[in-house]
Amino acid sequence: MAKLEVGKEAIEKKGWWRAYKWLILRRASQLGILGLFMIIPICKMLNPEGDCALGWIIKGNLSSSKLFDAIPMTDPLLFLQMIASGFTSIAIEAVIGAVIILVFYFLVGGRVFCSWVCPVNMVTDAAFWLRQKLGLNGVGTRFTRNVRYWMLGMILVLSAVTGSLAYELVNPVSMLHRGLFFGMSLGWIVIAAVFIFDLFITKRGWCTHICPMGAFYGLVGKASPLKVRADARDKCNDCGDCYAVCPEAQILKPILKGEKKGILPVISAGECTNCGRCIDVCGEEVFEFGNRYKR
């Protein structure tokens, strides 16, 4: 029997919306967060002399911002670079902001940032989609996923050695976010390089193998309470659709095949991005979001 197109069985059994629900909600989250940052700049552009009635909802960027002009939010990796580089005067707001973000991503699953917030994720997902369309899935170089953890350590060492925020000079997330407001300039080269790397060099190369921010949030999310569960794993028909769409497919086998070994049906790995695509594409409804501590 011919292999069905990935997700087709889910559409037939659950309907189109439930087969794409979490993907659509993720895109709405990513674009919505960008939109919140852009409300005032757009308002000022359209009405230079007038007031913007809405006011700032989020002011700043993904590295450092304020919610409702009151609640500080600081990228914890940026904060670690500040400490490593020997900054002697770190504002208390930066400390509070880093703690707020750490606690938030710990609760919801660290790499939720990667799949629900990071704008570069849309670029790498586009490269993955085009890679599939061009039949390039078997093309490219294999990288160990530990590279991203080496990258994380390396940028902290570089910050310490150079006394600077080393990674921020080339951080695609910061460059893309700032570029949307102030013009991309050299940012286009960095973003194009990420796209080409994912398209031709290795499948899901940047987010899955290289990105130090993904490595950091993966460490944060190792003990997060919100996880993807496979309580209905006995219904799995081995169609392979979840493996095809998961950016970290290696984390699925233990929970789907580990019942005889006593492995709980919960993805405990910090690498999971809680993107929900495995939930979307599974026609048997094996997966769901749930509490990691449930037995």
Image (spheres, grey):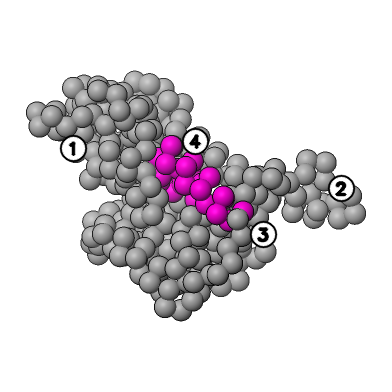
| Residue in view at x 43 percent, y 63 percent | 194
Observer-nearest of 167 and 130: 167
Using the numbered discs, state the Cα–Cα distance from disc 4 to disc 3 in whole angstroms.
24 Å
Q: Position of residue 34 (x, y in %)?
A: 61, 48
Magenta stretch: includes residue 114: yes
In the rendered structure, which disc, 2 or 3, sits on the residue that comes first in sequence?
2
| Residue in view at x 58 percent, y 63 percent | 90
Observer-nearest of 251 and 3: 251
User: Marks 4 and 3: which is nearer the front?
Assistant: 3
Region rendered in magenta: 93-120
- Residue contact between numbered discs 1 and 3, judged by CB atoms under 8 Å: no
Where the N terminus falls, by quadrant? top left
Look at label 3 and name its amino acid: Phe
User: Marks 2 and 3: which is nearer the front?
Assistant: 2
Q: Which residue is mark 3?
A: 181
Tell me if residue 133 comes above or below residue 294 in the rendering: below
| Residue in view at x 59 percent, y 44 percent | 33
The circle on residue 23 is none
**Could you say which quadrant of the image residue 22 lies in?**
top left
**Could you say which quadrant of the image residue 49 lies in?**
bottom right
Using the numbered discs, state the Cα–Cα distance from disc 1 to disc 4 in whole angstroms.
27 Å
The circle on residue 51 is 2
Q: Position of residue 169 (x, y in %)?
A: 51, 71
Circle 3 packing at 10 Å, graded few (<14), some (14-19), many (20+), is some
Q: Which residue is mark 1?
A: 254
Magenta stretch: includes residue 22: no
Tell me if residue 32 comes above or below residue 203 in the rendering: above
Q: Which residue is mark 4?
A: 24
In the rendered structure, which disc, 1 or 4, sits on the residue that comes first in sequence?
4
Secondary structure mostly seen in magenta is: helix
